[in-house]
Image: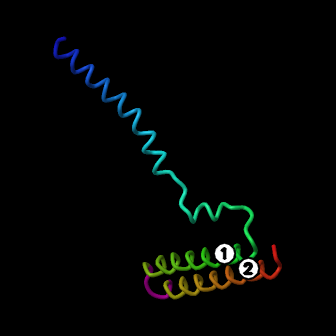
């Protein structure tokens, strides 16, 4: 075999190896986390849905506050008030859903 044939064979071997390994590694990284699996469970109790809704509302509030901190002056105050109002509305909706048993 000449040098070109050896290089071609080596490149072909490496390409086949990569094609065999990459999909397996990608599937490993795409596994569903425990929290995601719990959220996708459709048969959740009212209490579990309430707890999930409050957790999401608090996370959204935390993210909104972080965004508001990037703003200066009166806009920041307004932004923080809006974020707090949204949190209160989300928590009220969650509580209403819990009490109605939906």
Q: Position of residue 19 (x, y in %)?
A: 40, 32
**CA neighbours of label 1 inside 10 A, class few (<14), some (14 to 19), many (20+):** some
Colour theme: rainbow
Instruction: Give me the residue at 57% from left, 75% from top.
Output: 60
Q: Nearer the viewer, mark 1 or mark 2?
A: 1
Image x and y of residue 12, in percent: 31, 23
Secondary structure of the magenta portion, mostly?
loop
Label 1 belongs to which residue? 53
Taking the spot 48% from the left edge, 76% from the top edge, the residue there is: 67
1 or 2: tag closer to the N-terminus: 1
Query: Residue at label 2?
Result: 93
> In the image, is residue 64 above or below residue 27?
below
Tell me the quadrant of the picture where the N terminus can be found.
Answer: top left
* Horizontal relation, residue 66 to residue 47: left or right: left
Dot 2 crowding, Cα within 10 Å, few <14, some 14–19, many 20+:
some
How many numbered discs? 2
Q: Nearer the viewer, residue 70 or 3?
A: 3
- Determine the residue located farthest toward the top in the rendered image: 1
Q: Position of residue 101 (x, y in %)?
A: 82, 76
- Indicate whether residue 80 is drawn in magenta: no
Name the secondary structure under disc 1.
Answer: helix
Residue 13, labelled with which disc?
Answer: none
Q: Is residue 42 above or below residue 20?
A: below
Which one is in front, 25 or 69? Answer: 25
Magenta stretch: give its range: 71-75
* Residue 13 spot, x, y in % from top left: 31, 25
Which residue corresponds to the image point at 75% horizontal and 72% vertical from the top-left? 45
Q: CA distance from mark 1 to mark 2?
A: 9 Å
Of the 4 image quadrants, the one containing the C terminus is bottom right
Relative to 31, say whether 56 is above or below.
below
Mark 1–mark 2 CB contact (< 8 Å): yes
Label 2: which secondary element: helix
């Amino acid at each position: 075999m000449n040098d070109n044939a050896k290089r071609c064979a080596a490149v072909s071997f490496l390409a086949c190896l990569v094609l065999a390994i990459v999909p397996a590694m990608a599937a490993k990284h795409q596994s569903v986390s425990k929290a995601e699996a719990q959220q996708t469970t459709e048969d959740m109790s009212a209490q579990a849905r309430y707890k999930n809704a409050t957790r999401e509302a608090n996370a959204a509030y935390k993210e909104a506050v972080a965004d508001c901190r990037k703003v200066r002056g009166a806009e920041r105050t307004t932004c923080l008030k809006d974020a707090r109002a949204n949190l209160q509305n989300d928590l009220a909706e969650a509580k209403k859903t819990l009490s109605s048993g939906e």
